[in-house]
Image (tube, grey):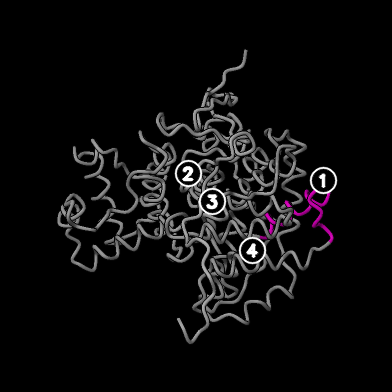
Amino acid sequence: MSETAKIIINGKEYELPVITGSEGEQAIDIAQLRALTGVITLDNGFTSTGSCQSAITFLDGEKGILRYRGYRIEELCQKSSFLEVAYLLIHGELPNAAQEAEWEHHITHHSMIKEDIKRYWDAWPQTAHPMALLSSVTSALSTFYEDSHNVYDPRQVEISIHRLIAKMPTVAAYAYKKSQGQPYMYPINRYNYIERFLYMMFALPVEEYKMNPVLVKALNQILILHADHEQNCSTSTVRLVGSSHANLFASIAAGVTALWGPLHGGANQAVLEMLDKIHADGGNVDKWVAKAKDKDDNFKLMGFGHRVYKNFDPRALILKETADEVLATLGVVDPRLEIARKLEEIALSDPYFIERKLYPNVDFYSGIIYKAMGFPTKMFTVLFALGRLPGWIAQWKEMIESKETKIGRPRQIYTGATERPWVPVNKR
């Protein structure tokens, strides 16, 4: 007999089904609640509301577990490429050799963008934020590929997936080049996915670009770690927009916009801004740690603790080693990175931080790595978007293919004025 939950409203008892996931998570199915009782639930921020059933990502914040399609994030970071993980998320299984070769071929040969699209950049100021360009051009791509907008045609969906994953790094790199006033660099097919992006970002026509394998490995890991993270703000946005049958380009553009918010994808940028602030004040780390501990002070250390992970962030453990390797390889001398190292040391040893589980999180380390690699702060969220892209696509695809999907339409509790008469303007 399946388990049920009982709810009593106005003295009448109702039974609602309880659903159990493959990892033992339980949820009360309230889909018929309003029809049965006339009432709805209220959950600001949806922190206790499941919006869907998904087979993509499992996250246990209490135990510090993150798995994609059942595979541990630690193992994927060590053994897989970002494109292989993208295939896994979107198609549900790791590719065999033939599938991987075909997948990489499609992505490689769709990496160029049409010359007409490049003219978009001419209309924007050089100071335009790269996320504004990324979201705008992602949406605009749909106008060039109107042959693939049918969300129920598997072939059209497939080619849209290839185009998006292939072209987003090109769009992102061009957004950076625009901000620098530098010439755009065409993608080079002999490079792999990560190498191609770094080339388009940092190469110049006047000299040969030297690829650093340590940086390629580091960026590959960071993108894998950001590839999906369950039903967060931007992913939920992609699903909600897609539930109206908006095409994949439009749905992903909406996700990019949601990610732009400083409370979501802007966290690693906030880390560097905090380091800049401490550096400008003289670099006295102890002073700012004391401010963070002072309950009457509004200052907060950015990049410590996590809303979901209550034990440790498994992604941060991986990136800590990567950060050490990148900094050692590059030999970067930057006072802000030294400040970051001091903050990390304090957070990992000070009882105040340990008791409150305020450990360095993935945003702390990714920001440090990006800074050392030469990415400007404004590009940090763009890099987050590149990493999250396959997760957004996988979630959109799963939502479209599910028979349970309905157009998203949350309810509300109205708290405004009750009915009142209209008053002529001269009597108001």
Q: Please tell me how crowded label 3 is: few (under 14), some (14-19), or many (20+) other residues with Cα within 10 Å.
A: few
Please name the residue shown 71% across and 35% down the image: 95
| Disc 3 from disc 2: Cα separation | 10 Å
Disc number lying in front (3 or 4) = 3
Where 25 sits versus 212, above or below? above
Mark 1 surroundings: few (<14), some (14-19) or many (≥20) residues within 10 A:
few
Q: In the rendered structure, which disc, 1 or 3, sits on the residue that comes first in sequence?
A: 1
> How much space separates mark 1 and mark 3, taking CA atoms?
36 Å
In the figure, residue 125 lies in which quadrant? bottom right
Q: Earlier in the sequence, mark 3 or mark 2?
A: 2
Residue type at tag 1: Pro
Residue 43: mark? 2
Given contact means CB atoms under 8 Å apart, are the residues at marks 3 and 4 in contact?
Answer: no
Residue 343 or 138: which is nearer the viewer?
138
In which quadrant of the rendered image does the N terminus lie? Answer: top right
Q: Which secondary structure class fits the magenta region best?
A: helix
Label 2 environment density (alpha carbons within 10 Å; few <14, some 14–19, many ≥20): few
Q: Secondary structure at mark 2?
A: loop
**Residue situated furthest top in the rendering:** 1
Which residues make up the magenta segment?
Answer: 147-167
Q: Which residue is mark 4?
A: 170
Q: On the picture, is 105 further left or further right than 174?
A: right
In the image, what residue type sits under mark 2?
A: Asp
**Residue with the mark numbered 3:** 412
Using the image, determine if residue 42 lies above or below residue 19: below
